[in-house]
Image: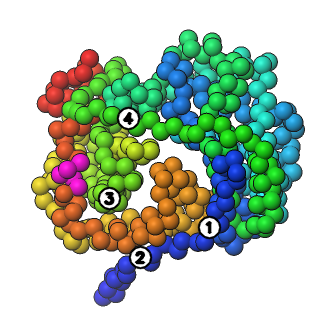
Amino acid sequence: MSAPRPVLGAPAAAIILPRNEQRLPNGMRATFVHAGAVPLTSVRLVLRTGSADVPAGRAWLDRFVHDYLREGTEVRDASTFADAMAAIGGQLSIAAGEHTTVLSTEVLAEHAPEAIALLAEVARQPRFPAAEAERLRADLRRSLDLALAQPQYVTYAAFRAALYPDHPYGRVIPDPAAFEGFDADAARAFWSSETGAQRALLLVGGLFDEDAAIAAWRAAFEGWEPGAAPVDRPPTPARGPSIHLIDRPGAEQSTMYVGRAVPDPTLPDYVALEVTNALLAGSFASRITMNIREANGYTYSPRGVISSRPHDSTWIEIADVTTNVTGAALSEMFKEIERLRAEAPPAEELVGIQNYAAGSFVIRQATPNGILDHLEFLDLHGLDATYSATYVERVRAVTPDEVRRIASEYLGSDAMTIAVAGDRAQVDAQLAPFGPLTP
């Protein structure tokens, strides 16, 4: 006779480590967090500039600038800068977003001050060699060709263009003709106008000498001009229903993005929305996944996500399904949405999802890089430590009736934006029951 299954207890609350937050007279901020047991330090310079700051008609200028940042600084060329990073056990990483550009590295603890100085050098003294502009433009053209060959990319682009018309969030695919205007002067002008001390946050996490790190930060950044303050551009998302089809003749799969605008992280319903998403679509045991993957075999890896920007969020279900079941998969997605809108989930099902959501949050805070990820999130949305300290408690407080309310208020199938990349000859008729295609 097998032993009874163990009963899981409630996840522990996340341990919120002390943070030393500092500010310079020029407006630059820094946060230092001691975490972990390995003598490594993660250093990030978060700059509040990204694709949302690029003027209309110049999409991907930010990518061009980020590629240029890898070409070295006024002090060291690309090779010499790479050698300097390697000498302290690190390398430069650049992560780009809609509102942030993140320069980062991870080094042995004793080299944290040098790492801070090197990241400051990239931000304050980028090289922008004119001779490299044509090569970098050619790289952009190749990247665009590769992106346009990916159904996930073109579907995402169509979804964003439909949801955010006349807004930077909707300008995903660039005009390649505009690349001709991308040169060293354009890169320098963008970086100069869109960066500065007011837009900068240094994050240091791990094991390190805090006094030495603070001294290095002050020395590297005290003389930086404040620059312009960051600008948020809250959109007015379009409300569905709308269906957008990208024809891929002969495609054996249809790639689908189905979603709509939902509350952002600053609003009271956001945490309950995260729990609702985990139950509906955002975990392996979610209802949509169990339906279209496990029960029907329409897809291998569907996922529901909440994508957030300042004062804006979208809920999205993403799936690649076999072409001949495109319509059937959509029907099953909407069936699960409407079932949750009409009927509160059983308490036992919800408890499992709450354990998953709370446990995932705690696990993500277990490493220095996970902590810095969370600090970036808080800063981007203007949230404080209270959000972190109460997160698990708020997840555990979500009730079945609240899940039903959240689904009912925010996830109505009749207001979804749908983007599909697939074989029009096979998919057209399957999409007809969901409404007319948008030209």
Q: Residues within 10 Å of mark 2 (few under 14, many from 20)?
A: some
- Eyeballing the image, is 213 above or below 92? below
Residue 51 seen: yes
Task: State the image quarter where residue 144 is shown.
Answer: top right
Residue kind at label 4, given as amino acid type = Pro
Residue numbers of the magenta segment: 406-410
Residue kind at label 2, given as amino acid type = Pro
- Eyeballing the image, is 395 above or below 373? below
The C terminus lies in quadrant: top left
Magenta includes 407? yes
Q: Which residue is mark 3?
A: 268
4 and 2 marks in contact (CB < 8 Å): no
Which is more toward the observer, 20 or 365? 20
Residue at 45% over, 75% down = 13
**Percent position (x, y) of residue 327?**
21, 34
Q: Which mark is residue 235?
A: 4
Front label number (1 vs 2): 1
Q: Which mark is residue 19?
A: 1
Front label number (4 vs 2): 4
Query: Who comes first in sequence, dot 4 or dot 3?
Result: 4
Residue kind at label 3, given as amino acid type = Pro
Marks 2/3: CA distance? 22 Å
**Percent position (x, y) of residue 367?**
60, 65
Colour setting: rainbow
Q: Residues within 10 Å of mark 3 (few under 14, many from 20)?
A: few
Marks 4/1: CA distance? 33 Å
Q: Residues within 10 Å of mark 4 (few under 14, many from 20)?
A: some
Q: Which residue is mark 2?
A: 11
Marks 1/2: CA distance? 23 Å
Query: Who comes first in sequence, dot 1 or dot 3?
Result: 1
Q: Residues within 10 Å of mark 1 (few under 14, many from 20)?
A: some
